[in-house]
Image (tube, helix red, strand yellow):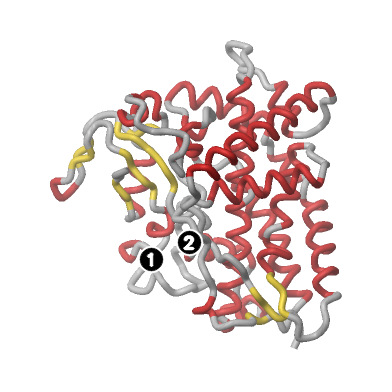
Amino acid sequence: MVAWAITTQPLLRKLLTDPRVSKDPRQHWPRWINGEISPEWPLFTWVAVRNMFTAYGGDHRRLRSLVAKAFTARRTAALRPRIEELAAGLLDSLAAEPAGAVVDLRERYAYPIPIQVICELFGLRDEELCERLRRCVDSLFHTSADPEEVTTTYAELYELLGALIADKRRHPADDMTSALIAARDDEGDTALTEQELADTLLLVISAGHETTVNLLDNAIHALLTHPGQLALVRAGEAGWDDVIEEALRFQAPVASLPLRYVVEDIELDGGVTLRKGDAILAAYAAAGRDPGLHGPHPERFDVNRVTKDHLAFGHGVHFCLGAPLARLEAAVALPALFARFPELALAVDPGELEPVDSFISNGHRTLPVRLHG
């Protein structure tokens, strides 16, 4: 499958707000319309879902309005005490490790916080179901999965989400799932369809879990491999917000996001034309290291960088509604970790760390560290 990869930040910003660019394959991608895309394709779920992620125009405005009623600033802010509690419990568990022990900080810290927050946001208290959701999301971001894994994951995800929705219809509560079920459009008094409801929950899981895991993973890794930058933070010469924004720029949690589609021909500078029906890949990681915007050394991690502009949460009408929650989780988890373990250090050479097996997800497979000297 061929797509245009947009790597410079100004051009990507422009296209992300251009009405001639759509996210709806059913209207604007000939390969989907012609039936050429099958469920065995590794990226099938990314384009097949029916939620605001793949909506266009008025349909997108309707869906985003309904979701915004459930994903409120109040609901996000109310999670802070629980995030602090989760972080403290995980840090207590890590502190029980013997001096010199090597632990995988991605698995033991960066991973559990976001999935638990999502499960509690949904009102899903069953640990076994949370673990199944986590495995499904892992598979969803595993873009080199074989066809059998893709179809199995797709089926299991919708089984889990269907069960959650049915339970919340019987037992509504103060959670996001119940709020989405109850949400109505102000004009037409219409609710999300069953497909839209399940796919919206899937969007929140995929956008709110793996991406936050990678944000924590990448920020921790960047600080441990740039001790001078960590020293600035410890000395109060840079804040944790600086760390978070620079980490989002330096190593965008989502490297590349499929897909967008050209609604009508778009002429670009340099004589390049994006043709109607062409697919577009938003290369967020590349845009975060645009030398035209970030200077001659965009590959350097610099918490005091003047221009930290990034597109890690998207841009325009599709800007991520969950961005405040991801920032909140990082703002709690990162300072708590480095305060609890001032001698924290990588246990391997940075060059030995393996990236996640996905061109979408931008993190490490493991993050082995020593907590104590």
Nearest to N terminus: mark 2 or mark 1: 2
Q: Residue at x 22, y 35 (%)?
A: 275
Q: Residue at x 20, y 44 (%)?
A: 268
Residue 12: mark: none
**Is 291 left or right of 252, judged from the image as shown?**
left
Amino acid of disc 2: Arg
Viewer-closest of 343 and 36: 36
Q: Quadrant of residue 371?
A: bottom right
Q: Residue 334's spot in the image, x, y percent?
A: 69, 66
What residue sits right under mark 2 in the picture? 249
Viewer-closest of 134 and 109: 134
Q: Residue furthest front?
A: 148
In the rendered image, the quadrant that contains the N terminus is top left
Q: CA distance from mark 2 to mark 1?
A: 10 Å
Secondary structure type for disc 2: helix
Q: Residue furthest left?
A: 271
**Is 16 left or right of 335, judged from the image as shown?**
left
Q: Residue 357's spot in the image, x, y percent?
A: 50, 59
Q: Residue 254's spot in the image, x, y percent?
A: 50, 53
What residue sits right under mark 1 in the picture? 294
